[in-house]
Amino acid sequence: MSTTVASSPTLVSNLLALLRQRQRSLVKRGKANPGLAMLALTAVLYFWIGRLRAGKKGPSRGKAIPHLKTRLFMLDVGYKYVKARAEGDELKFVQDLSKEGLTLTTEFVGHCLILAFEPSSVQHMLVKNFENYPKGPAFHKAFFPFMGTGIFNADGAAWKNQRALARPHFQVTEYKGAAHIETQINQVFGILDEVIVKRARLDAQDLWSRYTIDTATGFLFGDCVNALDIPQSKFVSAFNYTQKVCGWKVRLCDYQAFVPAFEFPQKVKDMDAVLLPIVDSAIAKEIQRRSQAEAGAENEHQHDNLLNHFLNSVDENGKPFDRIYLRDMLMNFLLAGRDTSTNLLTFMCYNLGKNPEIMKRVRDEIFEVVGKDRKPDHEDIKKLKFMKQVINETLRLYPAVPFNIKTCLEDDVLPNGYFIPKGSLVVHSSYVTHRMKEYWGEDAEEFDPDRWGTERVKVVRPFMFFPFHAGPRICLGQNFAYNQAMNTMTRLMQKYTWKVVDGFVPKPESDITMYSRNGMQLIFDHYRD
Ligand code: HEM
Ligand SMILES: *[C@@H]1O[C@H](CO)[C@@H](O)[C@H](O)[C@H]1NC(C)=O
Ligand SMILES: *[C@@H]1O[C@H](CO)[C@@H](O)[C@H](O)[C@H]1NC(C)=O
């Protein structure tokens, strides 16, 4: 591999220096914020500034985007938004906006904010004119204290380098099968057996969030955080907290300092208390391996997890990754891989629990292809066609990343003819586009895996469906995610069955990734013919 650095004495001493390096600036990163005091006072002013700024820029080409209808300097929409968010209806709120138009503009917190829901607009931003739509400064600023310069929060050279380094690791791992879930799936079975004996209900979201953090850390670090054993793990609650805060910061954009985040520095410390020792021990092992290699001992490069792989690579400036960069990298992959997979498993359980006839069809397919107790292999997984339809239908209705925001670098025109002024924030939403009646038909809101069947799938045109994003920044873990979900569901459904607690209605919402505000209450039982 061209990016791999061969062992040499200077590298060993570099690594030693890294190990000694003190925690660079993590504390400074997590500075506490001023309270909400000034927010109300300044809000009106910001909307004015935004209106003036946006007002100056008439379209130099293309059509002007229709304005979202607002009154009282947007306070009506602002109020409705905050209310919807507080009540857990943010997704619905944005979906309702799309009924006013598929391309809309407004001034929000001092910026021209554009909502672009048409598939052709999404394709334009993610693929055709990708270079013009980076994540941008507001996003970087919001996420820096938590994610540093990791892949999710990077643009330009740093992003390109990390992406190129990580890609081969994903390709290799996809075909290693599902060995990485073995320990955790057995822990899940143990937990389920217990709740069945107690005839208790179970919050499947909580279970899957601990399961996926363990499988992801195992896969990424070669070392798992054991959240399944320790339900109230500090790591998990800190991870939840920081995401909530960062989600709000992105939404407030330039005014993110108003998001109260007093516990932020402590939460970052709680996570670092887990991540930094993992990084340090990997560095120490690598130093040992290299000095043995120098002494002539037979010693293969260990690239069995992503951390090792990065340890043997260099950053965008040609330097070895330092421990903070490595920590950021781990945090980013964890964020990318955990909540998204949790969301998929949680809502799959929901949809199957609500639709017993679909559950039966999935189970029949499993029994036919894999059997009642065999572990599925890579070939089996490929044959589980109906399960894949169920996954796609779940990702359509409950896409793990329901919104995404980009910054427009230079004046641009969308394929539908609308003008986007330079500096605009452009929001697209898989959640909204995946549920548009114009594209999916009158039953767009209904769960129907058969719409992915061979006859109807032709109707799915490009960019009606993009749960994994698209273009150069498409999800690196897509195949990993399908494989993990299919392996997990196969093992689960061979042994168990479940239904949704009577009267339980999940409340999907999103900080960065989607989850159900009130969890996912299910009742499990052993499966018997
Ligand atoms: C159902 C599961 C998943 C869904 C729906 C999903 C979806 C997405 C989406 C929408 C993005 C783009 C985010 C953005 O640019 O703001 C993304 C990026 C990414 N995903 Fe996933 N993901 C899933 C699972 C995973 C897993 C399991 C991993 C790794 C273990 C992973 C790794 C990544 C990485 C590294 C990126 C960043 C790519 C880049 O910026 O170049 N994802 N994913
Ligand atoms: C973390 O958030 C998830 C929802 O995303 C929830 O199911 C889980 O119970 C939370 N865990 C903790 C320890 O707060
Ligand atoms: C599911 O969606 C993916 C895109 O994410 C697509 O490539 C695949 O063909 C779909 N599978 C089925 C069975 O519809």
Image (spheres, rainbow, N blue to C red):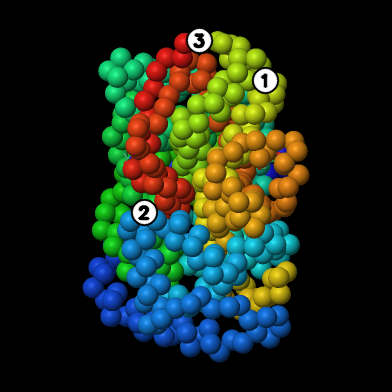
Q: Residue 510: image x %, image y %?
A: 43, 52
Q: Is residue 412 rendered to the left or right of residue 311?
A: right
Confirm whether residue 361 shows in the render.
Answer: yes
Along the polypeptide, which appears first: circle 1 or circle 3? 1
Q: Residue 265: image x %, image y %?
A: 30, 54
Residue beneath disc 1: 380
Q: Residue 344: image x %, image y %?
A: 51, 38
Confirm whether residue 376 shows in the render.
Answer: no
Q: Secondary structure at mark 3?
A: loop
Marks 1, 2: nearer the viewer: 2
Among the 4 quarters of the image, the one containing residue 116: bottom right
Residue drawn 45% across the image and 20% down it: 497
C-beta proximity under 8 Å, tags 1 and 3: no
Quarter of the image with the N terminus is top right
Q: Secondary structure at mark 1?
A: helix
Packing grade of label 2 (10 A; few <14, some 14-19, many >=20) is some
Residue drawn 54% across the image and 64% down it: 98
Residue beneath disc 3: 529
Three-letter code for the amino acid on which mark 3 is drawn? Asp
Residue drawn 41% across the image and 85% down it: 48
Q: Residue 405: image x %, image y %?
A: 54, 62
Q: CA distance from mark 1 to mark 3?
A: 22 Å
Q: Could you say which is closer to the camera, residue 414 or residue 11?
A: 414
Q: CA distance from mark 2 to mark 3?
A: 39 Å
Q: Secondary structure at mark 2?
A: loop
CB of mark 2 near ligand 2 (< 8 Å): no
